[in-house]
Image (cartoon, grey):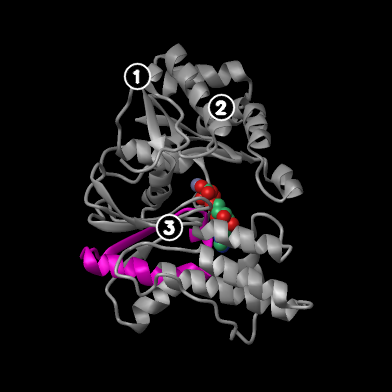
Amino acid sequence: MKILSIETSCDETSAAVIDYTQNQTPQVLSVVTSTSLAVHQKTGGIIPENAARAQVEYILPVITQALSDAFNSQSHEKAMAFSLLEKEIDYIAVTQGPGLIGSLLVGVETAKTLSYIYNKPLIPVNHLLAHIYANFLSPKLPINPFPFIGLIVSGGHTDLLVFTSHTEFKWIGGTRDDAAGEALDKIGRVLNLPYPAGPEIEKQALKATLKNIQFSRPLLGADNFDFSFSGLKTEAVRYIKKQSSIDAQHLSEICYGIQHAVADVLVKKTIKAAEHYQCSTILLGGGVSANSYLRNHFQSICKKENLPYSVYYPELSYTLDNAAMIGAYAALNNQPQSWNAVKANPELYFK
Ligand code: KG4
Ligand code: ZN
């Protein structure tokens, strides 16, 4: 079965074609992503109206290109691409939420229109679950990894879930205030780092030599699976504002300290959840899971403490917002709805 998938929850406009055969790893035939990041870098963050305007501009070219690439068509004409859609595609999948309403509407209404015109069943997808399902695009992940713990760490969310099957999962904890990515982005702004600051903090931290600036690890010892990053953010911002000047080495050490504190809480709480729910597999997803310090910290704590967990993270290209992960989720949770029942839902969370 072939799925055309569409992702427009925030500042990326992405379309992909996924080919899926039962009990096999979903194959990405194409994925095309445009981003309006440059616009948001000028404003130091995302202005929703700007993101939505860019979605309108990019959506048709991105879908056209994804269809042409998937079927090796030499022509990038819209008419040719849509005749490929009509002939070759079995389902359309789209991010329903959460996200920015203006951005979501562009993808959802486009998908609904195509579903109606070409009579293709429409599969609405939760963006956050799709971040975890980016892992299913890798042949390294066993076909049946259940039960597993999913850790979603994105710009807007930090959540822990236990999955017992593709259709059954339970939310066990999340952030009480800022998401991990949000805290990194806000601290980065005070450090004058470009938006989004997560990858910049990672780059700077690599240059640290002393590594002795410590920040607190909120809720680490608490008897729950919740997170809180706003205290850590305030502590870091206060520390930064107290300095009369910050040279390059000092900057890298601050970044290392912040990254280490965030990673330490994420890793230790996730391992605690895996122990509690007796899961031997952990799947990470979301933009912050691109962070190599976080990835290595999982491996090094498991190794140091001789823990039996297998930790997976998506391929880097499927870690940030992309439509391939939306197609992967739709392939493995094939639950189409009538096109006129599907509505963009910026507040969509976990049922
Ligand atoms: O999942 P995502 O692309 O968008 C949302 O759904 O929110 O995540 C974006 C977040 C931003 O906060 C960004 O700073 C963070 O992911 N991020 C990183 C890295 N790459 C992206 N954080 C730390 N290290 C990275 N390498
Ligand atoms: Zn995302």
> Image check: 93 left or right of 246?
left
Q: Is residue 246 magenta?
A: no
Q: Secondary structure at mark 1?
A: loop
Query: What is the distance, in whole Å, between disc 3 and disc 2 at their CAs?
Result: 29 Å
Q: Amino acid at mark 3?
A: Thr
Q: Amino acid at mark 2?
A: Val
Q: Which residues are magenta?
A: 267-295
Label number found at residue 44: none
Task: Give coordinates of residue 96: x percent, y percent.
Answer: 44, 33
Categorize mark 2 by other alpha carbons within 10 Å: few (<14), some (14-19), many (20+): many
**Residues at marks 3 and 2 touching, judged by CB atoms closer than 8 Å:** no
Q: Is mark 3 within 8 Å of ligand 1?
A: no
Residue pictured at 50% horizontal, 60% vertical? 180
Q: In which quadrant will I find the N terminus?
A: top left
Residue underneath mark 2: 106
Main SS category, magenta section: helix
Query: What is the distance, in whole Å, between disc 1 and disc 3 at their CAs?
Result: 34 Å
Residue underneath mark 1: 338
Report whether residue 207 is seen: no
Q: Earlier in the sequence, mark 1 or mark 3?
A: 3
Q: In which quadrant will I find the C terminus?
A: top left
Query: What is the distance, in whole Å, between disc 1 and disc 2 at their CAs?
Result: 18 Å
